[in-house]
Image (spheres, grey):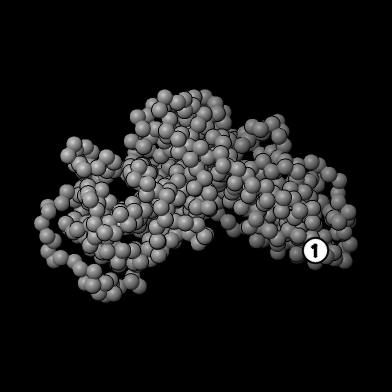
Amino acid sequence: MSEPKPTAESVSDNNMPYSVTPPILNLPIQTGRRPQPYMRTRTLKRWINDLPTADCQRTAFQFIEQLEKLNNGDYPPQERACLMDTLRPLAQQLINTLSQQIRKSYIPLSPRALERNQLLQDILSAMALGYKLVVNALAMTSPHREHDDMLLREALYFSSQYLSRQLLEAYLVYMPAPKNCWLELHQLFQYASETAMATLPVDDPYPDISIPVTTTLNLVYKRIVLLALAEPYHLMKNEAREFYYLLSAWSNHCELLPCANMPCEGEFSLDANADTPPRFVSSEIEWATENGYLLDISEVQQRLDAQLQRILRANLHELEDNANHTLMQQRRQRDMLLRLADAWQGNLARDGERHQCDTSIEMATGLNASHHYISLGREFSPEQDELRIKSEEIEPTIYAAAYRSALQKDRLHHNHDYETNPWWQRNVSRNGAALNCSIDCPQLHTAVGELVAYCDPDKQPLRWKLGVVRWLHARLDNHLDMGIMNIADSAVPVASKALDGCGEGTDYFRSLLIPKQISLQQRRCLITPANVYDINSILLINMRDKIFYLKLNRLLLSTQTFTQFEFDIVEKPPAASQDVFLL
């Protein structure tokens, strides 16, 4: 496909018979000659029916090749719109299939996943380009023929929809935003607003949302704007997609206000003449725009708060009802919306001075791996440890059966290989560090929200610090940049199981106890697997040679893989007085 170039005639022309400036778009240079062969809608339908649709990647290659020919050909906008509409059902099928395959992949992407991701981006880009060509042709023509205004409105909508989906798919794999995507979205929305088309409904036969909401360009544009304000590179795996569709119900309540000669510090803002996403303007950055807008998301925040309140009230009733602890999906949604609320408060700014450094570190990823290395690789056998501690309380006649049961349960924790990986540390502060990987990245399999333990391998004895992956940036060459937020300078490896409340009846899990004196938050806390326990759960904590009991009383941090709680020490609960080995 020809390299897209800005259309010079779309910038300014004193002979234009209209007052609205057409959008500045990247379009291929066309010869003006009739395409050979000239594609008709009926011929295109036959071509689609002959495709090997069972082979997604083969079909995708042929689809992109055909679409590039159409985009490079000179077709009247009315005929081009018909051709693009004919391609949309197959495009939607390919996009959904490739996106689903990529979502199952680890970050950074494997070579095969990278190929699928490139196919996905090429389809989205080519579909957007086809509709942009319709927009440009109709925007440069006046007066319009019958139905041309409707075609222009639909082309504005569909081109913006495909550009937005390009951004979403890039955010899902932590890749950079495709070049010119944001600029063209800003331009299309501005043109649609000036021609009063942004809020007019569009009949979309293949909507990407199932909620009963009117499909408009206003919705498409503001939805991706709100997602960008949620800091997509800080979101956990696949959360960007969930937010993207959730925001469909709220996006029309976001307002854009021209900000000429207005202070932007402490506000969300965007520059409609720049290829940049909207952002929170802090005092640390210089922000000057020629065509800037302030984003008023106060009503959207109110709706988010209202939904959070409903979920939190339902969660509170669940916690009070000791017989009902089945709403795991609701707790997950609660934690996800709390993270969105934090992002919209502008709470993701760096805190603390950073210092440049160039050192190598070793990192273990995940709660189980972190527990393994912090415990210096000791065997995890909590059932046998509890049996040894309680041996004098157990009847000799059942001790052998209790021992066999403990041994069998502990074997489930054995035979796991926990590896560490080398990372290069670029800068560091008391609160975190920025890391980079350029070798064997596809083998790392990391994720935002993952618990990590890391240390300097050249300093003996090894001192493992505890942190959480705060953000990821995958580069086009598949190198990976990572930000870590420190949790503690050390931790105590323990085993936990619930005796009462959420999680009751489960076996032991690896957990990490953080005493107050080594916590960066100056709080004693417990790190446990995600979605197992909740506030008010009473846990037995096994330290190999000692057992005590605690009650979780405050949620500090929740991700898709672990949860961090504050706790109070409590007496042995009456429910635990019965010997577990007699059950």
Total count of labels: 1
Horizontal side, residue 497 vs residue 91: left or right: right
Q: Amino acid at mark 1?
A: Ala
Nearest the eye: 527 or 244? 244
Position of the N terminus, as image quadrant, is: bottom left
Q: Indicate the position of residue 364 as horizontal and vertical percent values.
A: 54, 45
467 lies above or below 154: above
| Circle 1 SS class | helix
Nearest the eye: 165 or 469? 165
Residue that lies at the very extreme toward the left in this rendered image: 33
Which residue is labeled 1 in the image? 402
Residue at x 68%, y 51% (from the top left corner): 310
Residue at x 44%, y 56% (from the top left corner): 215
Horizontal side, residue 404 vs residue 425: left or right: right
Q: Residues within 10 Å of mark 1 (few under 14, many from 20)?
A: many
Q: Quadrant of residue 498?
A: bottom right
Residue at x 22%, y 62% (from the top left corner): 79
Q: Indicate the position of residue 440 as horizontal and vertical percent values.
A: 40, 48
Residue at x 66%, y 32% (from the top left corner): 521
Quick check: can you spot residue 239? Answer: no
Quick check: can you spot residue 204? Answer: yes
Q: Indicate the position of residue 526 as horizontal and vertical percent values.
A: 70, 43
Q: Quadrant of residue 26?
A: top left
Nearest the eye: 329 or 21? 21
Q: Indicate the position of residue 356 as horizontal and vertical percent values.
A: 45, 26
Position of the C terminus, as image quadrant, is: bottom right
Horizontal side, residue 165 vs residue 30: left or right: right
